[in-house]
Amino acid sequence: MAAADTSLAHEDRSHLVAPRGARRDGIFAKAVLAAAVLVLVILALIAWSTASEAWPVFSKEGFRFIFSNRWNPSKGEFGGLAFVYGTLVISLIAVVIAVPVSVGIALLTTEVAPKWLRKPLVYLVDLLAVVPSVVFGLWGINVLAPKIKPVYKSFADAVDWIPGVNRVFVSQGAQGRSIMTAGIILAVMITPVITSLVREIFATVPLALKEAAYGLGATRWEMIRGAVMSHSKSGLISSVMIGLGRAMGETIAVALVIGSSPQITSRLFNTGDAMASVIANNFGEADGTFRAALIGMGVVLFGITIIVGVGARAVVNRSTKKLSA
Amino acid sequence: MTALMGLALIMALIPLIAVLGYVIQRGAQVVDLNFLTKSIPITDRTIGPGMGPAIVGTLVITAAAALISVPLGVMGAVYLNEYGNNRRLSRIVRFFSEVMTGVPSIVMGLFVYTALVLRTKELNGLAGALALACLMLPVIIRSSEEMLKLVPLDQREASLALGARKVTTIFKVVLPAAAPGMLSGVLLAVARAAGETAPLLFTIGVVSKANPDIFSGTNTTLSAQIFRNAASPFIGAQDRAWGAAFTLICIVFLFTILARLLSALLTRRSS
Amino acid sequence: MSSSSPFSIADLSVHYGTRLAVRDVNLDIEPQRITAIIGPSGCGKSTFLRCLNRMNDLVPGASVSGKVLYYGEDMYGPNVDAAAVRHRIGMVFQKPNPFPKSIYDNVAYGPKLHGSRKGLDDVVEEALTRAALWEEVKDKLKSSGLSLSGGQQQRLCIARALAVHPDVLLMDEPCSALDPIATARIEELMIELRQDVTIVIVTHNMQQAARVSDTTAFFTVEVGDEGGRTGTLIELGETKTMFSTPTDERTHNYITGRFG
């Protein structure tokens, strides 16, 4: 029916009943549903496809894959404890460094800095997230590692007399490409992620809460501690978990600077290895069972990141339920 | 206390400046037209350009990844915001979409390796593109959904009240209104994908002559080349690595700046 | 029940989930007249209005029972296409909601939907003229609809609705977001349009209803035993009579300002 005709016959009502194009609506609805469900399908496929390739190694090693330290690919022994250990240690180092830094920057850009400065600062810090991991690795291995080795040695010498600490920061065996360096570069890389998450959380603190604190005579720091921090507790936990998850999955930069010799050691300045890096560094030359073992390492990594990711969301969901209860 | 926060800021900015500084210092001098177009020398020992094939690879593979993930991601977001509302399936999809953004990129590479490469026995650009697309998909779903949410309900009501169907309303009113923001999100996802290395390690192989065909033959990217050359003891390889890093940073920053300009334009328009 | 009346409504009730929002409405709307629907807030006026072009279909959990006959045909019948209904019955909303497109594209949106490509320029001009906006925008049709003032945007929305030549125009408090001058212009406009288009307007402004409408329907809200609020039609009549000698006491109380 041409819209340009003005002679609307009021008697002609039959088109009220003609379903035009309703079928098109239905097809489109199904198509977008399929696209959305794709996410779930892919996740399931990842789990299934990688696990089935790694199955031979899993069935042979069982839990030794994670808990045993006997890693001898040439002999077919795949106890990956050193890699699990390495991943955990460098991620913890990264989180210990990055979280205070991120919280500080987040507070700076939401509460403290003058308004005109906030956006530019945020943009600057976000640039860290734009730099590709491999570029951090290139810089790390060629610039940071050589320069930091003497720093490690001096630091280790300085704390040599402190019991306990002198087991962690040891001068002998200290390398530029080491666990500590990997942890530091990881910290740099996860800072923008945590900062932006924490910033969002701080930004949702209700103004009324802050004004209430001021109204009771709090100084700015007391207000931040009392209103902002206490309101953000679960969000902070969730952000830390997400940062931890990112650190554990980060591959390339770590692969270049960790030193690639798996060992379970408390000496942070020594070389080490991690799950993601061992895969990246060895996959090319690996074959047969070795390859399957590396894929298995990937499965374990996948499992860990899913657990951490789900946990992080659960923390937030539980606290939102509490708030609305 | 403010001093502590300032210290935190400096601690974050020093590495940024240091890395960018070195990349520019050591990379910019290597990059010239020769570098950007010549093939990659077969041996590391060789001194001299270029990284042409890697640039071609980066562009072609990233573009393919975008072509795969963007329509799917946008459609997924359309489902979540326009059809799914608060239904259980939507909540599950949203939840796992966020979880998926945390999956390490190397796992995506392993996935495509086991699911595709092992079966087709072929390493090519497409496999790499698929791995990158898996990385980009949840990010695009999330950012697109945010943009769709920003389109006010009364826009949809106005269109429907004129006798338009839901599909027409989505394509003629909602998507155009959300488009600048969604494009910004897409550009950011593309920037991230262009810099990725791990998913490509076991999917695209390596090549020294440019291969713009993603369907056949191995390929290489700037990121893969940097990784390969980073630990090399030879100056020639090192120089090429820094040059590639400089080129990659330029590409990635270009997309990021475009994305930010777009979203700044968007906020100015709506205020 | 007359098939020459645009709307013959019988026993209309609306549920949102289990809550009864509007109950048992019976009325006929007269063609080429302005019918005003007045009443205190929460009495279901807008809900009722949105039944008349099936906009309540869009609310999840909403269900409509009863009959709404559009020129004798049941709008909620089994084979009826809601989009076709909305093509014949236009709506203008409380807050002006032009698309972020050009003025031309806003008005042309409706006609383009229904297939026409030729003669669009004429259609757009006609609609803008009927909406008393043509003179003000004829030189800037390409500029964004959002660049207009509030009152102009609302007239743009009216033009957009008129461009598909509806028989009926439903207006949901169209002036409540506008200043008095813009309001007056739209009221003038409504009186002009009445000759071609049946108008049903929901308004919380009694003086407006008294000024523009021929017929007035008074709704009010009843509070049920469990505190549920349900709207229902109390009285329907010629505006002049309603405002001078209303039949029902509740109407009288509302009009004289004793409540609402």
Image: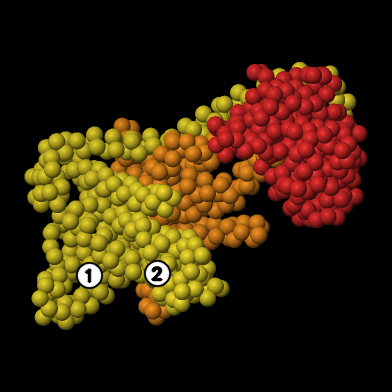
Number of marks present in the image shown: 2
Chain A visual colour:
yellow
Depth check, mark 2 against mark 1: the one in front is 2
Chain B visual colour:
orange
Q: Residue, x 40% and y 61% (percent of image)?
A: A232
> Is disc 2 in contact with disc 1, using a CB cutoff of under 8 Å?
no
Please name the residue that numbered disc 1 is placed on: A176
Percent x, y of residue C252: 80, 41
Check disc 2: other Cα within 10 Å, few if <14, some if 14-19, many if 20+: some
Is residue B178 or residue C242 the one in the foreground?
A: C242
Percent x, y of residue C13: 65, 28
Q: Is residue A319 left or right of residue A274?
A: right
Residue B212: tell me if it is visible: no
Q: Residue, x 19% and y 53% (percent of image)?
A: A84
Percent x, y of residue A119: 52, 68
Mark number, residue A226: 2
Q: Secondary structure at mark 1?
A: loop
Mark number, residue B103: none
Q: Secondary structure at mark 2?
A: helix
